[in-house]
Image (cartoon, grey):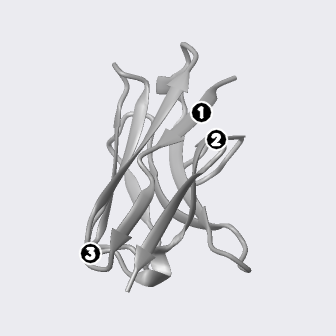
Amino acid sequence: QVQLVESGGGLVQAGGSLRLSCAASGRTFSTYNMSWFRRAPGKEREFVAAVSWSGGSTRYADSVKGRFTISRDNAKNAVYLQMNNLKPEDAAVYYCAAGYTLGSAAYWGQGTQVTVSS
């Protein structure tokens, strides 16, 4: 099992950048594929990005390709989401998740709020 805590959310103007972090506890972090999801008000939670356990494979939602970058540091038990050129439609609560396959989620963090002003 793994516990996940997100940080780095906040208020940013459209076109700006934020870097989200997810700190994981547990000695098995490096065995999990890690993902970011988000939920905007009135919408269902959606997949944003995923990185394989080794960091060698990544996957992105079409809506964030070219703007967001997911990465991980297994030595620090952490996963990151660098978000550039943010748009108002990126505003949401962002969740970190650990899963057994790329893009899946078996364990969730509590979420961090991202607000983008136009």
Residue at left offset 59%, top offset 33%:
4
For this view, does 92 lie left or right of residue 17?
A: right
Q: Quadrant of the C terminus?
A: bottom left
Q: Amino acid at mark 2?
A: Gly
Indicate which disc, 2 or 1, sits on the residue closer to the N terminus: 1
* Residue in the foreground of this view, choosing between 84 and 36: 84
For this view, does 16 lie left or right of residue 110?
A: left
Q: CA distance from mark 2 to mark 3?
A: 25 Å
Mark linked to residue 4: 1
Q: Residue furthest bottom?
A: 118
For this view, does 34 lie left or right of residue 117?
A: right
Give how far across and how far down residue 88 sits, in percent: 44, 82
Q: Could you tell me which secondary element the residue under label 2 belongs to?
A: loop
Q: Could you tell me which secondary element the residue under label 1 belongs to?
A: strand
Q: Which residue is mark 3?
A: 85
* Mark 1: few/some/many CA within 10 Å (<14, 14-19, 20+): many
Q: CA distance from mark 2 to mark 1?
A: 5 Å
Give how far across and how far down residue 15 sits, in percent: 25, 78
* Residue in the foreground of this view, choosing between 89 and 46: 89
Indicate which disc, 1 or 3, sits on the residue closer to the N terminus: 1
Mark linked to residue 61: none
Give how far across and how far down residue 82 sits, in percent: 31, 55
Give how far across and how far down residue 106 sits, in percent: 71, 41
* Mark 2: few/some/many CA within 10 Å (<14, 14-19, 20+): some
Q: Amino acid at mark 3?
A: Asn
Residues tagged 2 and 1 counted as in contact (Cβ below 8 A): yes
Residue 3, located in which quarter of the rendered image? top right
Q: Quadrant of the N terminus?
A: top right
Q: CA distance from mark 1 to mark 3?
A: 26 Å
Q: Which residue is mark 2?
A: 109
